[in-house]
Amino acid sequence: MSDTFETGPTVGTVYGIPPQPPIAENTRVLDAGALRIGVEYRDVTPDDLRAAYAGDAGQLAELEEKSPVGGFADEGVSVHVFDAEDGHEYLRFDLFDGEPHYHYNHRPGPDGEVVNNVVPFDVTAGGDMLAWAFGRLRTRLPEMLTKAGGVDLAAKVDAALLEPVLTEAQAMAVVARAAYRRAAGA
């Protein structure tokens, strides 16, 4: 079976830079066996993105090249799916207000090349992305991990360990989104 058939066609945009790393003090991480699920409220600004990639001239150049006029700016809850063993983030759901999307984030290749596939989310077709994302984590996680290059991790997903963690993480995401919107007066 070919990789294309197993993982499906690539949709969205592939970046040669990894997603902006989560901010540890803003991220609650829950253990789920071989996985860790993180919930973070993020306020992404062009300056923060430039600072995140400032240590790598090539990544910074790609960020600047692919950024819209004025830079990327958005905010909302992010849900992270990490390998518990080494912390690699394979999947991220950015439940953002302006441009919700999700990431298939492969491990760096042998020469350090990055494959960060960003897929836009259509709220008209998919509804509330928060509910949609947790639905995918419950029903499609092994397939999504495989698409992100995490076939070995996908084989280790333990649904019995995962479900209570997803229930807690989803409740945390709902609270984080509501708390921000209340504070912002939205």
Image (cartoon, rainbow, N blue to C red):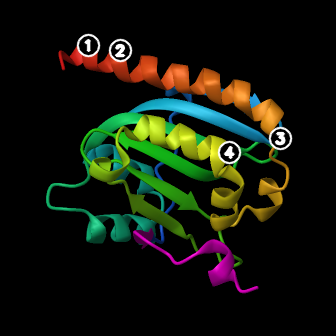
C-alpha gap between disc 3 and disc 4:
14 Å
The amino acid on which the numbered mark 2 sits, given as a three-letter code, is Ala
Marks 2 and 1, Cα distance to the nearest angstrom? Answer: 6 Å
Residue found at x 36% / y 37%: 128
Q: Nearer the viewer, mark 3 or mark 4?
A: 3
Q: Nearer the viewer, residue 79 or 164?
A: 164
- Asked if 163 appears above or below 115 in the picture, the reply is above
Residue holding disc 2: 179
SS at mark 2? helix
Q: How would you rate the neighbour count of disc 1 (Cα within 10 Å): few for under 14, some for 14-19, many for 20 or more?
A: few
Q: Residue furthest bottom?
A: 2
Q: Which residue is mark 4?
A: 82
Instruction: Decide if residue 117 is on the left or right side of residue 88.
Output: left
Give the mark nearer the N terminus: 2 vs 4. Answer: 4
For the point 69% across and 67% down, the residue is: 149
Please give the label number shown on residue 158: 3
- For the N terminus, the quadrant is bottom right
Q: Which residue is painted at 72% across and 55% down in the image?
A: 142
